[in-house]
Image (spheres, rainbow, N blue to C red):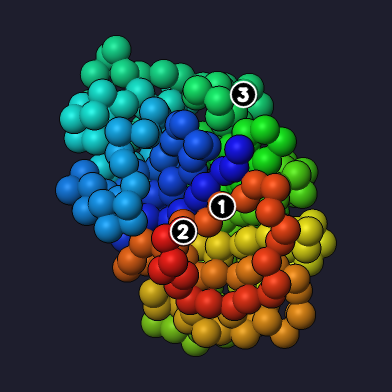
Amino acid sequence: MSLSFASLNSGSNGNCYYLASDEDAVLIDAGLSCRETEKRMSRMGLSIGKVRAIFVSHEHSDHIKGIPVLSKKYNLPVYITEPTLKSAGFQIDQHLLRTFRANEEVLIGNISVLGFPKLHDASDPHSFTVSCMGITIGVFTDIGLVCENVIHHFSQCHAAFLEANYDDEMLDRGSYPYHLKARIKGSYGHLSNKQALEIFLEKGKHMSHLLLSHLSRDNNRPELVLDLFKSSMINTEIVVASRDNESGIYHIGQKAIRPTQYSLFDQIHD
């Protein structure tokens, strides 16, 4: 038994994360169009027929854009909190709507999905862990401040998607207006490269894989965050999840952790 995981896209232009056991799969967010989601899954050799549900982290368009069409076309239940549903402004067939509550596990086949609150400028934002047979993978993006919830759940993961949205100097020197810079750096905005490294070094060095996610196009560069993590000499495979392409597919089971590697994209679909 193993858990597989991949990023279909990660960034302000669309977010979608695939996590699967041998039998079942879920999507965390679906911010790509239905057609683009289908195209990328096909290129990866993944069957959308294996997907059993979509879980929604919050209502921003880059996380929900593809959900109505995907849900209707493939009869996929959508798990969403009531405040997020009210703020999302989309229509989901009533028989496919499922509400979830914070810190309560939802069983999807042999997968357990747990949503927990985080700090972000949305109505009721949540991050998620996905578990099966003692293996846990987390999705930690769109986080303004590393709160106790995030710290606790991050420390339980064998692998994770972790936001590294901006480089401090690039953001400070960039052309964004002051109020937007303040929003990004604030307690309800996004995590910087340095903040991502800090939580990883404190609570994540045991992980086999870390996919750095939701990089800003204007205020970050993959090379910057990779160099930052590489300088810490960690025994974890570090990958930057692209905002333009799908990642490779990664597996965690009973196999030993791979040696340290650093890459922008892993296109080996093993």
Front-lying residue, 64 or 60 = 64
Q: Dot 3, how many residues are within 10 Å of its Cα: few (below 14), some (14-19), or many (20+)?
A: some
Q: Residue, x 61% and y 38% (percent of image)?
A: 1
Between the residue at mark 1 and the residue at mark 3, the CA separation in whole angstroms equals: 22 Å
For this view, does 206 lie left or right of residue 173? right
To which residue does mark 2 refer? Answer: 270
Q: Earlier in the sequence, mark 2 or mark 1?
A: 1
Q: Are marks 2 and 1 in contact (CB under 8 Å)?
A: yes
- Inspect the image, locate mark 3, and give the three-letter code of the amino acid beneath it: Glu
> Which of pointers 1 and 3 indicates the residue nearer the eye?
1
To which residue does mark 1 refer? Answer: 251
- In the picture shown, does residue 235 fall above or below 141? below
Q: Residue, x 35% and y 23% (percent of image)?
A: 77
Front-lying residue, 126 or 105 = 105
For this view, does 168 lie left or right of residue 201? left
In x, y percent, where is residue 25? 44, 36
- Inspect the image, locate mark 2, and give the three-letter code of the amino acid beneath it: Asp
Name the quadrant containing residue 27: top left
Q: Is residue 56 visible?
A: no
Front-lying residue, 18 or 212 = 18
To which residue does mark 3 refer? Answer: 105
